[in-house]
């Protein structure tokens, strides 16, 4: 029997800061690395090519879901493990992934628990941990959905989601500017996806933001993450308010144009 093969797939843009460390933790035990870039202007490509010749570019950004679908179309291996450039596979997770592939049963896909570090602190609560994400599956079995943002892997009917034990380390924002830059992209994509389909109001935006803070800081015990938990709850509440306010403003402007 031929050996079961495993690919790592990433979509990237301007990830020179993180990419080398990410690829160093997988390159010597996976069979294939596939990277789809969306127009990097830093050293992302030169770093990627140290580890793989399967580096592709698509500058016509279709949204996160479809960009991942395109990247997966380049994968030739039996299994695909999806990573982001700011993630690291721990030795324990590596063993779990290899065991899962070796003992794989039909109609199974696998989820991994991420452990996130934000602004220099490991976040243990705040709704950020546990953080289960489906990242490993047979390439022919499924793919990501079409969502512009907050995309997810489609779980086929009758498939079982198996939890792996090793953690995936996630090194997200170090500076506030990184947070605001990334969330601005998410806010716009979120509103683009719902414009004309979802109604809201300014008061509704305020309520959504308020309850987001309560959920993160109180219900999800963000207060146990100390000052970082408070900061994350405030930032998330502001992001939630802003995206609903954006949606409300778009609808308001359209109505004003019709009236005039």
Image (cartoon, rainbow, N blue to C red):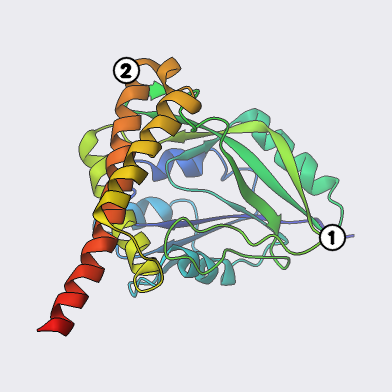
Q: Residue at x 51, y 71 (%)?
A: 70
x and y, in percent, of residue 243 in the image:
30, 54
Q: Which quadrant would the C terminus be assigned to in this image?
A: bottom left
Q: Residues within 10 Å of mark 1 (few under 14, many from 20)?
A: few
For residue 12, say whether it is visible.
yes
| Residue 119 appears left or right of 257 | right
Q: Which quadrant would the N terminus be assigned to in this image?
A: bottom right
Label 1 or label 2, whichever lies nearer to me, is: 2
Q: Quadrant of residue 234?
A: top left
Residue at the outermost left position? 260
| Residue 139 appears left or right of 41 | right
Q: Quadrant of residue 144?
A: bottom right
Disc 1 target residue: 2
For residue 14, say whether it is visible.
no
Circles 1, 2 touching at the beta carbon (< 8 Å): no
In terms of secondary structure, where does tag 1 sit? loop
x and y, in percent, of residue 36 in the image:
44, 64
x and y, in percent, of residue 34 in the image:
53, 60
x and y, in percent, of residue 120 in the image:
34, 23
Of the pair 86 and 212, the residue shown nearer to us? 212
Disc 2 target residue: 227
Q: Residue at x 49, y 32 (%)?
A: 127
Q: Residue at x 42, y 59 (%)?
A: 149
Instruction: Kindly report the distance in space between the C-alpha atoms of the residues bearing marks 1 and 2.
Output: 53 Å
């Amino acid at each position: 029997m031929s050996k079961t093969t495993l690919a790592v797939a990433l979509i990237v843009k301007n990830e020179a800061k993180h990419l080398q460390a990410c690829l160093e933790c997988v390159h010597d035990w996976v069979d294939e690395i596939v990277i789809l870039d969306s127009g990097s202007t830093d050293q992302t490509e030169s770093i990627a090519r140290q580890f793989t010749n399967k580096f592709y570019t698509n500058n016509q950004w279709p949204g996160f879901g479809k960009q991942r679908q395109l990247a997966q179309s380049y994968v030739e291996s039996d299994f695909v493990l999806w990573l982001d450039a700011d993630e690291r596979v721990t030795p324990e997770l590596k063993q779990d992934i290899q065991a899962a592939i070796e003992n794989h049963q039909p109609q199974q896909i696998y989820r991994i628990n991420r452990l996130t570090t934000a602004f220099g602190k490991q976040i243990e609560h705040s709704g950020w941990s546990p953080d289960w994400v489906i990242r490993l599956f047979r390439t022919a079995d499924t793919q990501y959905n079409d969502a512009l943002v907050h995309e997810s892997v489609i779980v086929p009917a009758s498939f079982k989601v198996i939890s792996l034990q090793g953690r995936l380390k996630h090194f997200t924002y170090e500076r506030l500017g990184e947070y605001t830059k990334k969330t601005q992209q998410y806010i716009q994509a979120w509103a683009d996806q719902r414009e004309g389909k979802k109604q809201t109001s300014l008061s509704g935006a305020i309520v959504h933001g308020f309850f987001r803070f309560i959920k993160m800081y109180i219900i999800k015990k963000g207060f146990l993450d100390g000052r970082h938990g408070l900061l994350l709850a405030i930032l998330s509440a502001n992001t939630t308010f802003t995206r609903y306010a954006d949606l409300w403003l778009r609808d308001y402007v359209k109505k004003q144009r019709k009236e005039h």
